[in-house]
Amino acid sequence: MPIIKNIEEREITLPESGAKVKFLERMTYGVILDWGKTEADKTDDLALAAFLITGWDLTDEAGQPLPINKDSFRKLSFADGDFLITEINKSFTKGVEEKKTLASE
């Protein structure tokens, strides 16, 4: 009998700031539908990354939580931003590679 898995989240720690970030490990049909309903530029990688992030503990200088959006991404150090995008890409690439392997068996 086919099984539908729950959407999994992954938590990482950014290397420079030490901030914790949680993001979706895979896209489901519902996530894709929700992304389609947003007003974000669908070709904007930062907007997509922000959409996939489910939480983080980043704050501004006043201790106020930063909203999860591409403007906040632009405030990250290069090391943190590059690490975050790389980790999100790795999660999705891993899923695609696993599907290719299963399809070829």
Image (cartoon, rainbow, N blue to C red):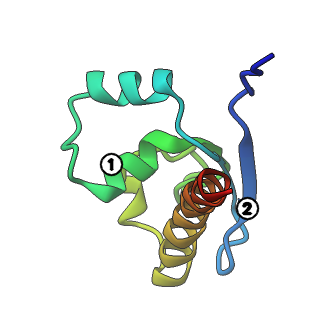
Secondary element at image label 2: strand
Q: Residue at x 73, y 61 (%)?
A: 12
Residue 18 lies in quadrant: bottom right
Residue 17 lies in quadrant: bottom right
What amino acid type is highlighted by mark number 1? Ala
Q: What separation in Å lies between label 1 and label 2 (alpha carbons)?
A: 19 Å
Residue 16 appears left or right of 44? right
Give how far across and how far down residue 7 sits, in percent.
68, 31
Q: Residue at x 77, y 21 (%)?
A: 3
Give whichever of discs 1 and 2 has the lower sequence position: 2
Residue 75 appears left or right of 15? left
Vertical side of 33 occupied by 66: above or below? below
Badge 2 density bin: few <14, some 14–19, many ≥20, Cα 10 Å: some
Assign the C terminus to one quadrant of the image.
Answer: bottom right
The reply to whether residue 71 is in sight is no
Identify the mark at residue 97; answer none if there is no mark.
none
- Closest to the observer, 47 or 73: 47
Badge 1 density bin: few <14, some 14–19, many ≥20, Cα 10 Å: many
Residue 101 appears left or right of 36? right
What amino acid type is highlighted by mark number 2? Ile
Secondary element at image label 1: helix
Assign the N terminus to one quadrant of the image.
Answer: top right
Vertical side of 1 occupied by 96: above or below? below
Identify the mark at residue 47; answer none if there is no mark.
1
Q: Residue at x 57, y 44 (%)?
A: 65
Q: Which residue is mark 2?
A: 12
Q: Residue furthest front?
A: 105
